[in-house]
């Protein structure tokens, strides 16, 4: 297996761990009645599942388009929630909701790129491995100007990479509240680690596409 193959499988394993983490948080919240953002947990879990499929599996063109539309709706939902949070409470908690919005935007870009590859190569499905073999900047095909294909541009990818790097830097630099560093310090560290894993995987996939 090539070095790139090992990297993709390693990142896929990390995404599976992220999915398990967020599903466990959802289940634990029901048992312990802890206040969590269920939409955020579901959003991260959904992103992890789809990124795993893109890294090691294949998605049909129609499924890529359908998922892209789902993430468009999710992106608008989280963006509206983050704006509302900022208006009502200021910067506190704003980035926590803005992060999923950026993640969903990255998912829309990657799924749009997959749909573009499928159209241009007449493939039933494609994967990250197949995309590496195609030297197609932005993964958009000449002559195909569908809305999804137009989203997959190098400028959009660059903006999403910068936004994801900024989120990763915020995750590393922020200081959790003292309450988070008490008995739940291990859980907080695990959450930060999962967030960074998602950021790193997103950046890798955006650059690879």
Image: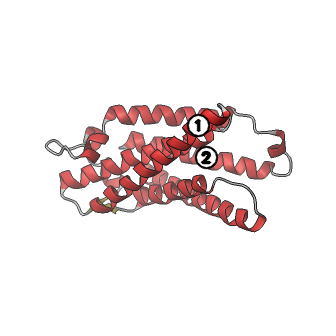
Q: Residue at x 65, y 31 (%)?
A: 90
Q: Position of residue 166 (x, y in %)?
A: 55, 32
* Residue, disc 1: 168
Q: Secondary structure at mark 1?
A: helix
Q: Quadrant of residue 65?
A: bottom left
Q: Earlier in the sequence, mark 1 or mark 2?
A: 1
Q: Residue at x 72, y 55 (%)?
A: 35
Q: Quadrant of residue 28?
A: bottom right
* Residue, disc 2: 195
Q: Position of residue 47 (x, y in %)?
A: 49, 54
Q: How is the image coloured?
A: secondary structure
> Residue 38, relative to residue 108: is it above or below?
below
> Residue 13, relative to residue 106: is it above or below?
below
> Residue 41, relative to residue 162: is it above or below?
below
- Whether residues under marks 1 and 2 lie with C-beta atoms below 8 angstroms apart, the answer is yes
Q: Position of residue 89 (x, y in %)?
A: 67, 35
């Amino acid at each position: 297996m090539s070095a790139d193959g090992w990297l993709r499988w390693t990142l896929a394993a990390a995404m599976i761990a992220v999915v398990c983490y967020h599903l466990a948080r959802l289940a634990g919240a029901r048992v312990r009645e802890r206040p969590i953002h269920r939409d955020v947990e579901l959003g991260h879990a959904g992103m992890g599942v789809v990124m795993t499929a893109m890294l090691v599996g294949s998605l049909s063109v129609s499924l890529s388009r359908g998922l892209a539309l789902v993430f468009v709706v999710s992106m608008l939902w989280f963006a509206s929630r983050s704006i509302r949070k900022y208006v009502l409470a200021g910067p506190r908690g704003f980035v926590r909701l803005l992060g999923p919005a950026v993640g969903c935007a990255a998912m829309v870009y990657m799924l749009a790129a997959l749909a573009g590859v499928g159209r241009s190569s007449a493939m039933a499905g494609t994967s990250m491995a197949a995309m590496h073999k195609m030297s197609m900047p932005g993964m958009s095909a000449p002559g195909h100007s569908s809305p999804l294909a137009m989203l997959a541009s190098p400028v959009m990818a660059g903006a999403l990479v910068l936004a994801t790097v900024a989120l990763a830097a915020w995750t590393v630099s922020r200081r959790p509240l003292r309450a988070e560093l008490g008995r739940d310090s291990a859980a907080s560290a695990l959450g930060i680690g999962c967030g960074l894993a998602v950021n790193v995987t997103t950046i890798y996939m955006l650059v690879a596409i």
